[in-house]
Image (cartoon, rainbow, N blue to C red):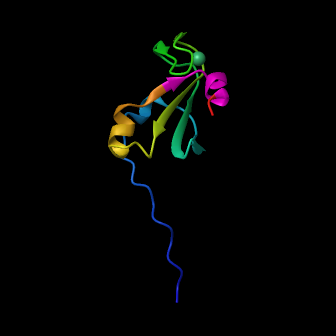
Amino acid sequence: MPRKHPPRINVTPFDETVFNATKRIEVKRGHRYEIHYSRNSSHPYRCAGCNREIPSGSNTFTVIDLDHILGVQAGIDERRHWHPDCWRLFR
Ligand SMILES: [Zn+2]
């Protein structure tokens, strides 16, 4: 009998054109996070880790909580931007 594939996470697409690079999944604090790495961002953002500005033109991580308590769509809607170094320090 063929093995069942594990269930896939169904992520509603959002503005992918903002991102020009890879994404990956990381698990922190029991949540799966989808990390989008973006070079040379076109907008300034506020880092969710240190609360300081990420100037436009920086490298940023956009982080989606796939295990958001209100569901994946809420995780997408509330996605946060991080300095890569701040994200690495987040445990
Ligand atoms: Zn930061």
Numbered-mark total: 0
- Does residue 86 appear left or right of residue 19 in this picture? right
Q: Which of these two is toward me, 44 or 29?
A: 29
Residue at image location 59% in from the left, 21% down from the top: 83
Residue 77, given in percent of the width and then of the height, sits at 34, 33
Is 87 rendered above or below residue 71? above
> In the rendered structure, does residue 87 fall within the stretch colored magenta?
yes
Q: Is residue 60 left or right of residue 44?
A: right
Q: How far across and down, in percent of the image, does residue 52 sit?
A: 54, 10
Location of residue 28 (image quadrant):
top right
What residue is at 61 percent from the left and 28 percent from the top? 87
Q: Is residue 14 visible?
A: no
Kindly report the secondary structure that dominates the magenta region of the rendered protein: helix
Q: Residue furthest bottom?
A: 1
Between 41 and 85, the residue placed more toward the observer is 85
Q: Does the magenta segment cover residue 45?
A: no
Q: Residue at x 66, y 30 (%)?
A: 88
In the rendering, at what x and y percent does residue 79 appear? 42, 31
Q: Which residues are magenta?
A: 81-89
**Residue located at (50% from left, 33% from top):** 63
Image quadrant in which you'd find residue 59: top right
Residue 16 location in percent, x, y? 42, 35
In the displayed structure, would residue 46 be above or below residue 84?
above
Tell me which image quadrant ligand 1 sits in.
top right
| Residue 71 appears anywhere in the view | yes
> In the drawing, does residue 75 fall left or right of residue 83?
left
The front one of 24 and 39 is: 24
Instruction: Reply above or below: 1 against 55.
Output: below
Q: Quadrant of the C terminus?
A: top right
